[in-house]
Amino acid sequence: MNTRFFNGRICTMENGSDIISGELWVEGNRVSYVGPGKPSDIHFDREIDLMGNLVLPGFKNAHTHSAMTFLRSYADDMPLLDWLHKQVFPLEAKLNAEDVYWFSYLAILEYLSGGITANMDMYMFPHEHARASIDSGIRTVIVGALNNFGGSIEQSERDYDYFNNLHERISARFGFHAEYTCSPELLSEIGSMINRRKAPVYTHCSESKREVDECIARTGLTPAQWIDSHGIFNYGGGAYHCVHLTREDMQIFKQRNLAVISCPGSNTKLASGIAPLSEMLDMGIPVALGTDGPASNNCLDMFREMFLATGLQKLSHDNAAQLDAMAVLKMACSTGATVMGLSDCDSLAAGKLADLVVIDLHQPNMQPENNILKNIVFSGSKSNVKLTMINGEVLYEDGVFHTSEKPEYVYRKANEHARRIKEAL
């Protein structure tokens, strides 16, 4: 399908954050033109008058546990360990593959309504999240969750090859849950696999102070140093949360070409702390944003993550100028794509994939237009998402989902499966 967006404003993220007035053309699944209006001999199946609204590269949710929607608002306002051991783990033990399909589909609808065009998901039954992604139309990167309690090196390699050849919108990265759920022997095996495959890897790292303290007590090293000592970071990748990185840890990230995926909403709700994002950026470490799972957030909302990312840096540094909103918008739209291995989705330019969001500027919270892009970070919300396009297909527009399943049916199925799990306890 060929689509013409005209009479609008476009922030391509191609060369900084300048906004241009003009048109954007999509041919098939890729952008074919961005610039001033001009004649075209292309047959457009649809021409969309933007009426002055803004087109951005879609938001990239670089850390998710999507199927945890079934735990939303079920395990809240509790200490972290009680939350995990008394609520999350017992219910997760009852999950089956069909549960994960519907819980993932529910999360994907929320992604689409919030302008999220790609997610990087780590959870059990990854084949079901991939199936829900294919059926719904979203772009997904599957990350392995190898640990002492599930999976194997052989399965990790099979999944990696399978998902990277499954579908044009599905890709995969090697991953393991965390150093504290992997024995030293398993970490050594992961290191051997990574160096054999010469591939990046992703994991949780230094999310809580307790995690860091216990790792030092066991090994004499911080989580980042311990993982690196097994050769796991030799080919780059990324780590989630990274709230309690030391300066030495950040040096490892810089040397190993590692990215940080920060989840300020989850870290706030679980009282994990404030990640030193400004220091990371000053060292040249790429920083992307993720929502984490809907049990620990509970809102899968990149607008909120952007506001918290800049707001918490200002608070922790006692400096209202800390972490400019424009840097945060870049994290959400562009850097996230790079970190996820989606280099064709990091900007809007000829030849890039047509993954984009239209922001409705004709709403009170977007006016006046003193600075449109800062409005998005500081006052924007999901209510400003007018349209979400992925791979050249409009999947959400003006409150209507264009997915394989109607939202009310997804809600009903998700509630049925959630009841089954609770009744099984």
Image: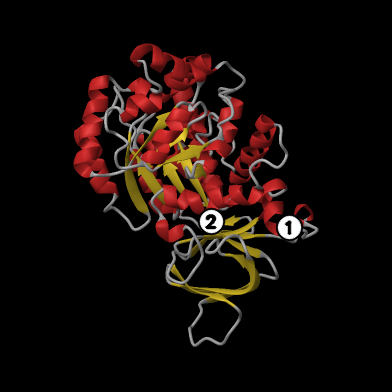
Return the residue nearer the eye: 268 or 422. 268
Q: Is residue 265 left or right of residue 370?
A: left
Sequence-earlier tag: 2 or 1: 2
Return the residue nearer the eye: 399 or 248. 248
Which numbered marker is on residue 371? 1
Quadrant position of residue 229: top left
Q: Helix or strand or loop: what does disc 2 sit on?
A: loop
**Nearer the camera: disc 2 or disc 1:** 1
Cα separation, mark 2 vs mark 1, equals 19 Å
**Looking at the rendering, in which quadrant would you find the N terminus?**
bottom left
Which numbered marker is on residue 58? 2
**Residue at image point 63% right, 70% down:** 20
Q: How many marks?
A: 2
**Residue at image point 75% right, 61% down:** 362
Return the residue nearer the eye: 286 or 401. 286
**Residue at image point 52% right, 38% down:** 280
Residue 8, compared with residue 263, is above or below; it is below
Q: How is the image coloured?
A: secondary structure
Three-letter residue code for mark 1: Asn
**Looking at the rendering, in which quadrant would you find the C terminus?**
top left
Q: Helix or strand or loop: what does disc 1 sit on?
A: loop
**Residue 300: percent from left, percent from top:** 56, 40
Q: Is residue 114 left or right of residue 374?
A: left
| Label 2 crowd bin: few (<14), some (14–19), many (20+), radius 10 Å | many
**Residue 422: percent from left, percent from top:** 48, 22
Q: Is residue 316 left or right of residue 90?
A: right
**Residue 101: percent from left, percent from top:** 40, 40
| Label 1 crowd bin: few (<14), some (14–19), many (20+), radius 10 Å | few
Q: Can residue 178 be seen in this view?
A: no
Residue 150, compared with residue 302, is above or below; it is above
